[in-house]
Amino acid sequence: DEHIELPCFASFTVLKDEAGCQWMVNYLSTFASVAQKYNVGLILETATWRAHPECLRKLAYSEEDAVNVNHKSVELLCGIRDIYETEQCPIVISASVGPRGDGYTPSATMSPEQAKNYHATQIGVLSQTKTDMIAGLTLNYPQEAIGIVQAAKEVDMPITISFTVEKDGKLPTGQSLKETIYLVDKATDNAPLYYMVDCAHPSNIVHTFLADEDWVERIHGIKGNASKKSHAELDECTELDSGDPLEFGADNQELLCKMKHLNIFGRCCGTNYRHVEEICKSCIPVFHQLEHNKRRYTV
C-alpha cells in the first residue's frame, strides 16, 4: 500500500506530471492483470471523480487545465486497454463523475436542473474523449443523479448511476433505494443503463435486495468498501481499515447468490487488487453454475 496526498480527494491531481501518470498506469495495471488472469471483463474508471468545476477552482486549475485533465485520464486508460484487452478480457472505459459535495453527506443539494447545468461542462468534455460511457458515482440524493443523467443524454453518452448507501441500505438522506431508483427512472425515461451501489460493505447491505421487485433488477453492480464500519465511524478513523480480503470475496459471493442478475463487482474505500482477486475466486464458480445467466462477469 502506498500513501499519496489527494487534496479534496481529487485523484486527478496525481496526473500533474509524468511520474504521477506512470504511477497511475502501474496502479491500474494491477487490476487489469487480475482481470486478464481470470478471463473476466474489466471496467476501468477514470481519475475524474472530482474533476468538476467547484473542485477544480479550489485547486486553482484553469479551464484549459480542466479539459486537459479529463482528456489525460481517459488517454491513460486507453493505453492500458491496448496492452491488456483480449477476447476473454474485454475492457470498458468509464468516465467517472462525482457529487458536487461530499460523497457521504448530501451538502449543498441542487435541483435536477441545477445539477444538469453544473455537471454539463465536465460531461461535455468527457463526451469528446474515447470513453465508452459516463458513470455518476457516490451520489447521495436523487436530484443530482437526475441532473447528471440528463446532462449525459444531451450529449448522447451512455450513463450509469451508483448511489452511496448506509448500513441500513438507505441513502444518507434516509431515502430508500427503491424510491430513489423509481424517481430517477421516471424523470429520465429509464435512461441509466443500470444502477450500482457503492461505498458499503456487501455484508451490510445484502438484506436490502431481498425483495422480488422490478427495481432490484435495475441494480447490476456493487463497489464495496473493505470495512464494515459505518460512514460516520470511517470518518473518525485515523488509520485505513482494509478489512479482510478473503471475507470480502465470500461476502460478495453471498450477495451474488441472492441477486443472481448481478454482473459487476468492484472496489471502493480501503480495497486493493487483493480484494478484487478474492472476488474473482469466490464469484466466478457461482457464475459458472448459473446456466441462465449468459452475461459477462465484470470486475
Image (cartoon, rainbow, N blue to C red):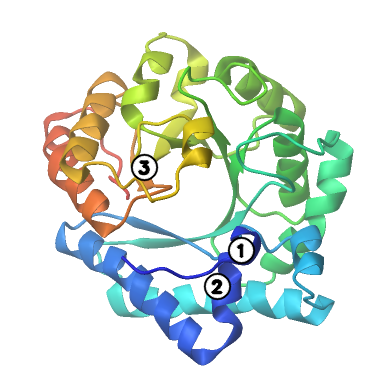
Outermost residue, bottom direction?
A: 18
User: Which of the labelled discs sits on residue 264, or is there none?
Assistant: 3
Badge 1 amino acid:
Ala
Which corner quadrant of the image does residue 56 belong to? bottom right
Q: Are marks 1 and 3 in contact (CB under 8 Å)?
A: no
Q: At 64% from the left edge and 22% from the top edge, which residue is drawn?
A: 180
Query: How far is the residue under mark 1 from the one under mark 3?
Result: 24 Å
Circle 2 SS class:
helix
Q: Position of residue 249 (x, y in %)?
A: 21, 39
Q: Quadrant of the N terminus?
A: bottom left
- Which residue is identified by label 1? 10
Badge 3 amino acid:
Ile
Q: Are marks 1 and 2 in contact (CB under 8 Å)?
A: no
The crowding category of the residue bearing disc 1, from other C-alpha atoms within 10 Å (few below 14, some 14 to 19, many at least 20), is: some
User: Which of the labelled discs sits on residue 102, or is there none?
Assistant: none
Sequence order check, earlier mark of 1 and 3:
1
Sequence order check, earlier mark of 1 and 2:
1
In the displayed structure, would residue 19 be above or below residue 273?
below
In the displayed structure, would residue 28 be above or below residue 144?
below
Query: How far is the residue under mark 1 from the one under mark 2?
Result: 15 Å
In the displayed structure, would residue 295 be above or below residue 272?
above
- Answer whether residue 88 is visible to the viewer in this image: no
Q: At 63% from the left edge and 65% from the top edge, which residue is drawn?
A: 7
Which corner quadrant of the image does residue 192 belong to? top right
Sequence order check, earlier mark of 3 and 2:
2
Classify residue 5 as left or right of residue 239. right
In the displayed structure, would residue 224 be above or below residue 167?
below
